[in-house]
């Protein structure tokens, strides 16, 4: 970039970013990157000014400067990389110039200059990092809710949350604290005391939610097909969705609280220790959450992978099991995609006629021929099938009936 004054400033971490600059330049950047309005949200004035100041936008005056946070799609990020002239990921602060007569972005280049104002702005880089982390966490929650068509207010008002305390009150305190922080660039003692007081509440929220998810896993691991089917249908009917959303709310609010803790630590001159503590806590939370969800994914897959006899003796119930497990997997995938937490959620669906054929093969080659005919939908078996074969089929039928009785008593 030449000596032209930049009118765009970006702070980029992966596909998440903050931008400050003139409204015209921001609008054009979004058009260039194909960022949709629903992927953006307004920044507080103090954060926008800090970002603009860091990149030398607007002659450091802040006049006419606005700001947004935004999420890029992989396609948008590829366009950003082209504008940045980069062949590898380019994180941190970059600045851009809107200088063509037709209003197109000419280039976005790495910020390399350092002025007294620029250095002063970056004395506390945690302002930008905290803001981006909070906005990204909120976006992940929104992505999850949208993908499963759920309403957060409805979930938070649910009677199942009584053991969690005042979830909405905790979210309100964090909303207020972050709003004040973004508008002023500082975190007052009063607000910090209110935020810090939510730590135990959030830990309890996550623990209770994960315990309920563990309970679903235990139900899917129960002995007896009927019990596993009931557990799967219960989970798929709304129970799992509820506790996944509560888990997501807890994780989102923990990220927001952690971000404010780092800002507070930086203001006290102890940002490094706070940042290390926050990162260790984040890793532990992530590992604990992923372990619980992976256990559930494996339990659901195992429940759907019923043994051959169970599949044959439950021709009407197995489709219900497959349907319930499919819904469990859909919810888990929505969560894992939103929070970049890959899970193995695959399971194999077996058709009833395939199971019947397998059972026949297990009962013997002769019986297999007769059972295969039945499974194929043929009304009458060939006359060549002798009475001995019929006895074999009756034996299988009696085995099925005995298994039903035993399972009903379990």
Image (tube, helix red, strand yellow):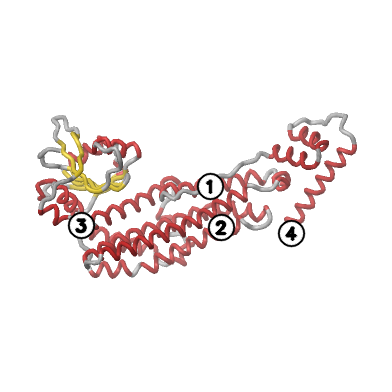
Local secondary structure at mark 4: helix
Residue count near mark 3 (Cα–Cα under 10 Å), binned few <14, some 14–19, many ≥20 = some
Quadrant for the N terminus, please: top left
Distance Cα–Cα, label 2 vs label 3: 43 Å
N-term-proximal mark, 4 vs 2 = 2
Quadrant for the C terminus, please: bottom right
Distance Cα–Cα, label 4 vs label 2: 22 Å
Residue at (31% x, 52% y) in the render? 135
N-term-proximal mark, 4 vs 1 = 1
Residue count near mark 2 (Cα–Cα under 10 Å), binned few <14, some 14–19, many ≥20 = many
Residue at (34% x, 36% y) in the render? 75
N-term-proximal mark, 4 vs 3 = 3
Q: Are marks 1 and 3 in contact (CB under 8 Å)?
A: no
Residue 238 drawn at (x, y percent): 52, 53
What residue would you read off at disc 2?
216
Distance Cα–Cα, label 4 vs label 3: 64 Å
Residue at (39% x, 67% y) in the render? 201
What residue would you read off at disc 1?
345
């Amino acid at each position: 970039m030449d000596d032209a004054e930049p009118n765009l400033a970006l702070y980029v971490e992966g596909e998440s970013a903050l931008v400050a600059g003139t409204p015209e330049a921001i609008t054009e950047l979004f058009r260039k990157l194909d960022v949709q309005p629903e992927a953006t949200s307004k920044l507080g004035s103090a954060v926008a000014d800090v970002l603009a100041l860091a990149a030398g936008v607007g002659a450091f005056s802040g006049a006419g400067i606005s700001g947004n946070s935004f999420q890029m799609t992989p396609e948008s990020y590829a366009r950003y990389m082209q504008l940045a002239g980069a062949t590898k990921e380019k994180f941190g602060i970059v600045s851009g110039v809107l200088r063509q007569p037709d209003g197109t972005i000419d280039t976005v280049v790495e910020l390399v200059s350092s002025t007294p104002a620029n250095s002063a702005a970056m004395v506390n880089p945690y302002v930008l990092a905290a803001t981006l982390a909070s906005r990204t966490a909120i976006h992940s929650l929104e992505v999850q809710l949208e993908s499963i068509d759920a309403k957060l207010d409805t979930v938070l008002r649910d009677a199942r949350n009584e053991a969690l305390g005042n979830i909405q009150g905790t979210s309100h305190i964090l909303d207020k604290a972050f709003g004040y922080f973004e508008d002023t660039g500082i975190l007052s003692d009063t607000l910090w005391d209110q935020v810090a007081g939510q730590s135990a509440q959030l830990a309890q929220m996550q623990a209770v939610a994960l315990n309920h998810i563990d309970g679903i896993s235990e139900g899917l691991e129960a002995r007896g097909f009927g019990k596993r089917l009931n557990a799967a249908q219960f989970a798929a009917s709304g129970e799992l969705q509820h506790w996944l959303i509560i888990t997501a709310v807890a994780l989102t609010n923990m990220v927001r609280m952690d971000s404010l803790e780092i800002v507070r630590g930086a203001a006290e001159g102890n940002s490094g220790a706070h940042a290390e503590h926050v990162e260790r806590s984040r890793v532990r939370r992530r590992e604990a959450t992923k372990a619980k969800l992976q256990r559930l994914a494996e339990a659901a897959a195992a429940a759907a992978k019923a043994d051959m006899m169970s599949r044959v003796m439950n021709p009407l119930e197995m489709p219900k099991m497959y349907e319930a497990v499919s819904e469990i997997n859909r919810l888990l995938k929505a969560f894992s995609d939103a929070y970049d937490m890959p899970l193995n959620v695959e399971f194999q669906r077996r058709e009833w006629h395939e199971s019947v054929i397998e059972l026949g093969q297990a009962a013997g080659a002769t019986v297999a021929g007769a059972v295969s005919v039945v499974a194929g939908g043929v009304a009458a078996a060939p006359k060549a099938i002798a009475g001995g074969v019929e006895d074999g089929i009756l034996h299988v039928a009696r085995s099925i009936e005995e298994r039903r009785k035993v399972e009903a008593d379990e």
